[in-house]
Amino acid sequence: MADTKPTYEELEARLVEAEKIIEAIRAEEVDAVIGKDKIYLIRLKEMEKAVHESQEEARERSAEIEAIYNSAPVGLCFLGPDLRYIRVNQRLADINGIPVTDHIGKTVHEIVPQLAARAEEIYQHICQSGKPVFNAEFKWASASEPHLNRHWNEHWSPIKNVNGDLVGINVAVHDITERKEAEDMLQKAQERLEEKVAERTTRLDLLTEQLRELTMQLMVTERNERQRIAGILHDELQQFLVGAKIRLESLYQSLNSEDEQGKLDKSIQLIVESLKMSRSLTEELAPKAMEHESLGKIFEWVCDFMGKMHNLKVELVLDDEIEIRNGDIRLFLGQSVRELLFNVVKHSGVDAARIRLSRDKKGLLQIAVSDQGKGFDPSLIHETQPLGTHFGLFSMQQRLSFLEGSMKVETTQDKGTTCTLTLPLEGIEPPEVAEESTPPGNPSETIRAHKGSRIHVLVVDDHEVIREAFIALLEKEPDIKVLGHAEDGTQAIEMALRLIPDVVLMDINMQETDGIEATRAIHSALPEVQIIGLSIDDSKATVERMYASGACGFVGKDCGSADVLAAIREHGLRHKRRNAPSQSLPLM
């Protein structure tokens, strides 16, 4: 096709465009003109300016990102697939104590070799699961400060390309050393608090134990004083009264005057009444019925006594036949029931009451004294009573609590009152107490008054420091009581036969008689006593020899105190359960 000639208008337009190009070139706005079919203007200055502005903006954004990255409160880094550092922020460099530039291109093993194994483990997990790992904790000590432990918490997030291949890992590192130290301080403070609480609890237990013992001593003192006064009344006053009566009766026969005989007869009657009163007071102070081990017999006497002395009709209901060998406890229960019946006489407004003796579902002794009288305000139980008065309900409650018992009062206005005394039968039954001169070779007659609900331990070791350490450990435990300690096997045998502990903590290697021989002797004489071997040497041969001698357990001296306490409690409680049916324990 032949080229067509441009029209005038087209030529004029081209001329105008050419003039513009020439003007742009003159103004240095255009560097070149390129075109085949068409003319193009390349505005290089504008493009350079735009590129420059774009680069400046990119640099500013990069600087902002870098500033944010480096000012982050946590350590940040980007690891390649070979666990080499590609990028690291300043915080992580500070944590590691190594400049940022010294990280780049190096592996985790080269920078923090203490964490390399753990890092490799996490990396393998991410490769297999493809999932991030959060809250991975690291603990290590730096070479410059080996005495200080550092704690880190790290988040590992995998970075994948469009094909799903792992190309790197973003890691965020939190230095939680201060938090861990604070937690440790808090834990130590908690432990110290628990120690204080344990100390005070132990002190309270000790005070309770002392109160319990004082209660028993008070009961014994009351019994002895009652018996002393009753003895004086019976052995002295009554004898004097009988002697005076006999002399007066002899004089009466010699008198001839009826008037004089009448006067003398009145004197004789006064002596007779005094004798009756003295005998009644003697019986009240130290009733012969209290010698019965049967509570039923004792309460029969109480019912008869209240009928004779106060015209109170008392019904006795015996659901169980219960015998108590502890005379002090029998006296306390008899006195308590009599006091409750006195309250019926004084306050109820009725002339009848009821005593019911039984065991509850747990086997506890229960004594219920009830009436159908006026009732009273239970808050009056806790009113302070004047010194020297009879011990009332509050005092009775206190004494029962020290004997591990309780009292429950149920009262309703005009509908009567029921007071129920509850007491554990075990713990109030002491074995027979022998004289101190009882030979140690006869354990059945050994003093056992110390036995109670706690586990009683004899500590045997020839090292004083170790003995004292074990004793200090055991004395902090409220359920364990150290009966004594021995420094050799011979002394251990003698003390075991005399004290009869629940558990013997027996050292094996001792001078003269060693722990093996002492264990054999004690086990032969007292097979029920639990013996736990104690030694640094925990070889199989040593342990087997100890078991063959009669030991029930073995603990190494280097084991934790919790293991020692656990062994003592395990075997001590086993001993108590084994001996519970045939041997009841006295009150502590």
Image (spheres, grey):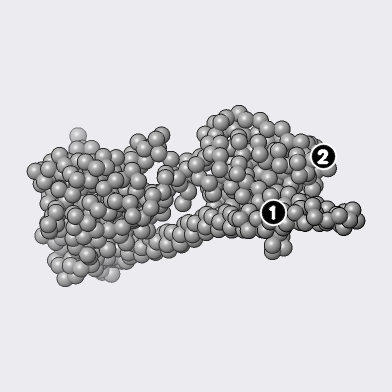
Residue plotted at (22% across, 56% down): 491
For the residue carrying disc 2, how many other residues have a C-alpha within 10 Å: few (<14), some (14-19), or many (20+)? some
Residue pictured at 73% horizontal, 36% vertical: 314
Image x and y of residue 463, in percent: 19, 63
Q: Is residue 22 above or below residue 283?
A: below
Q: Nearer the viewer, residue 360 or 581?
A: 581
Which picture quadrant has residue 184?
A: bottom left
Residue at 66% over, 39% down: 301
The secondary element bearing badge 2 is classed as loop
- Judge whether residue 249 can be spotted in this image: yes
Q: Nearer the viewer, mark 2 or mark 1?
A: 1
The disc labelled 1 sits on which kind of residue? Answer: Val
Question: What label sits on residue 539 in the rendered view?
Answer: none
According to the image, label 2 marks what residue? 350
User: Whole-Å distance between the Cαs marked 2 and 1?
Assistant: 39 Å
Image quarter hosting the N terminus: top left
